[in-house]
Image (cartoon, rainbow, N blue to C red):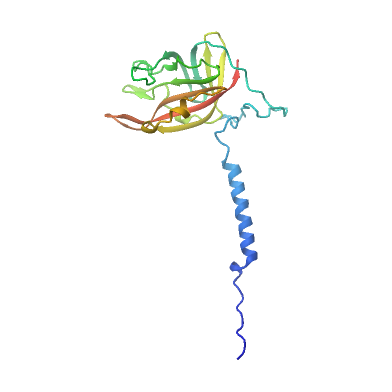
Amino acid sequence: MAPRRRRRRPWYRTRAYRLTRTALLVTVLVTTGSRCGGHGGAGQAGDPDGVAVAGPGVSSADGRPTPPPRPLPRSRPTSFRIPSLGIDAQVAAVRLDGERQLATPPVDRPKLVGWYEGGPTPGESGTAIAVGHRDTRTGPAVFAALAFVKPGQPIEVRRADGRTAVYSVDQVKVFDKAEFPDQEVYGRTRRPELRVLTCGGLYTRRTGYTSNVVVLAHLTATK
């Protein structure tokens, strides 16, 4: 009986093809990761005009590392600006209410930004908190467009001593109010950082908004 002749494997089942396919897949994944990763991290940013914003540890134009700015001494905030959103608002102090929840500015002053007076002032070390309304029954409020601020864009807070703390946006997150991460938002930090809060998610007359929009930023300059 003549020996059975072995069939030749199709090209797509050969070992050489599998190795080549694996190498190509790895190359694609690495390329995609470098394009999509890093957005929203500290120091990786660009404003709408394409001007790079250097953060702590990021090389400046001459190639030398840019040192982080020194924290400022205590001085109350007087004005709050997000130039990219056209926000330029006055600031008022807010406290915790009777249920130890962060209070908001009065509803009849929808363009006012509240600054938690129990925390750091602008530029001080630690986590500073600013809060404002998204809208009221009469129309949009100061933080109506807060969710659209982009990583790297500046937030400027003027102080009573005439100095200005400039923060750069790291991330914009939306948290369900029922699962709000207190530690992530309010937790202590060594460097000067800022959290800006407003309402977000779905709205019903009975329960209000379901979520909070939170902007996370860190100090990148003082002037």
User: What residue sits 72% from the left and 27% below the top?
Assistant: 64
80 is higher (above) or lower (below) than 35: above
Q: Residue furthest left?
A: 206
Seen as rendered, the residue at the extreme top is: 161
Q: How many numbered tags mark residues here? A: 0
Please name whichever residue, 4 or 141, is drawn nearer the observer in this view of the structure: 4
Q: Quadrant of the C terminus?
A: top right
- Residue 207: x percent and y percent? 29, 29
Which residue is most to the bottom?
A: 1
Task: Tell me which corner region of the image, top left, top right, bottom left or bottom right, holds residue 165.
Answer: top right
The residue drawn where x is 43% and y is 30% is 181
Between 84 and 182, the one lying in front of the other is 182
| Left or right: 111 as drawn, with respect to 2 | left
User: At x 43% / y 13%, what residue is drawn?
Assistant: 93
| 90 relative to 20 in the view: left or right | left
| x and y percentages locating residue 186 in the rendered image | 46, 24
Q: Quadrant of the N terminus?
A: bottom right
Give how far across and how far down residue 97 sits, in percent: 35, 17
**Residue 185 relative to residue 106: left or right:** right
